[in-house]
Image: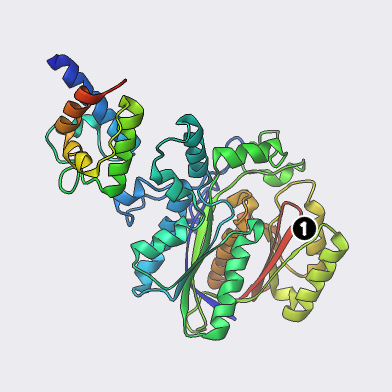
Amino acid sequence: MEATQTQLKSQLKEQIVKHLNLLSVKPEDIKDDEPLFGEGLGLDSIDSIELIVLLQREYGIDIKDPKEGRKVLVDINTMAAYIEQHRTK
Amino acid sequence: MMFIHDTVCISPQQSYLQETLFSGSNEIKSPVKNILYAIEPSYEMIPPGILRRMGRAVRLGIGAALPLTKKEGKPFDGIIIGTSMGGMEDCVKFLNQIIEYNEGTLTPTNFVQSTPNAIAGQLGLMTKNNHYNITHVHRGFSFENALLDVDMLLNDDKNRTYLVGAADEISSYNYNIERLAGGYKTEPLTGNNLFNSLSPGTIAGEGAAMFIINGDAPKAKAAIKAVHIFQTENEEELRKQIQHFMQAHIPQSASCLLLSGENADSRYQHYYHCCESLMGTSSSIARFKHLSGEYPTASSFAVWLAAEILDRQQLPAFCVKKQVNNAIESVLVYNNYKGIQHSLVLLQKA
């Protein structure tokens, strides 16, 4: 179970770097509890839309409520936990 | 009369911040598989968070423009850009997403970056400039229309200063369409010998050239005296148009250098020969498409090169087709796009 979640987090980091074209960031450099927005990875509002689209395309998850999005898109830990619970593919 | 005060050019040659191309030690870059890709700088002035979203044309345009905005130190009275294709690569990515994801949720970045006005728009946002901001999109006349726009604005108020320029990229989409349409040579060129290959088609190119232009003569690098555009496939009409332009603007053709957009495409060589024949035997002739490749706004590279030649009074040997030892008082840039769009830009010493 733990191995699966570690695998999911690694995959998620790779997807984030690729989808957001984070030129100077290596997937392994992103910490699981590092904030995605503001300080930390420094993503912005356009990135949040890209991440919502990523969740839909890669995991079949639809986030329609912006409040829910804010709770999910905090760090790698929160995203991975949400994916595990809600993924349809 | 418009005066060019500063320039930056990103091209397939070492033209960025200008020193190397004119130093004499620079080796001219040759096309690979008949393509001349621009040499991109490190874009240190573009924040990484913005750079990662930029498509190639936007990077080229903004990368060339930002050093000029920094040098100017105050907001320009307008940002005027010419581009034929804009970010075509991103446009195609966006269209492919529509198909791939069955018109579902689409990401905004490719769409935002793909519009032709992304270059001028992002420049306005990045430099907090809310003045006149416009993009001219008219195939081979895009850059010339930007120049005509500035000319009209300076006629209203010559105390204004504008950022003017052009950018176009080689995208896989437009390259393949052009290739299938016979726009590029089928035999691979070895080395930089474009003009030895007189077959149909040319080589692909890309780049961005930006200019600070205003109505003040003092300290200018060069002046743009006249710009003329016209469409014709008739050589006699071309001859009349060029003759009329020369009679109106070039009284002494002996000291005028012709900077020809000749691109070794056998289908269109006669247009360039016609223009050369009108210059007279005592004019020097230079060419630039072996340096820039062919693209809709390649004339912006030519205007950059012409401004540098006039400012430095130096005609690089790698451009020369015919040299007559006269001082270069003016440069006539003649360019043709796709055998139908012709442009004449006359520059002279400031």
Q: Is residue B1 left or right of residue B126?
A: right
Quadrant of the rendering where the N terminus of chain B is positioned: bottom right
Closer to us: B290 or B93: B93
Q: Residue at x 39, y 45 (%)?
A: B108
Closer to us: B18 or B64: B64
Residue B170 visible in the picture: yes
Residue B18 visible in the picture: no
Quadrant of the rendering where the C terminus of chain B is positioned: bottom right
Q: Residue at x 19, y 27 (%)?
A: A80
Q: Residue at x 67, y 37 (%)?
A: B179
Q: Quadrant of residue B336?
A: bottom right
Q: Chain of mark 1?
A: B
Dot 1: what SS?
Answer: helix
Q: Whole-percent x and y of residue B135?
A: 53, 63
Closer to us: A49 or B248: A49
Q: Whole-percent x and y of residue A63?
A: 28, 36
Residue that protrudes farthest toward the front in the picture? A65
Q: Residues within 10 Å of mark 1 (few under 14, many from 20)?
A: some
Q: What residue is pinned by disc 1?
A: B272
Residue B43 vertical placement versus B350 (above, below): above
Q: Whole-percent x and y of residue A53?
A: 34, 36
Closer to us: A89 or B208: A89
Q: Is residue B307 left or right of residue B226?
A: left
Q: Whole-percent x and y of residue B28?
A: 55, 48
Residue type (three-letter) at the residue carrying disc 1: Tyr
Residue B238 vertical placement versus B246 (above, below): above
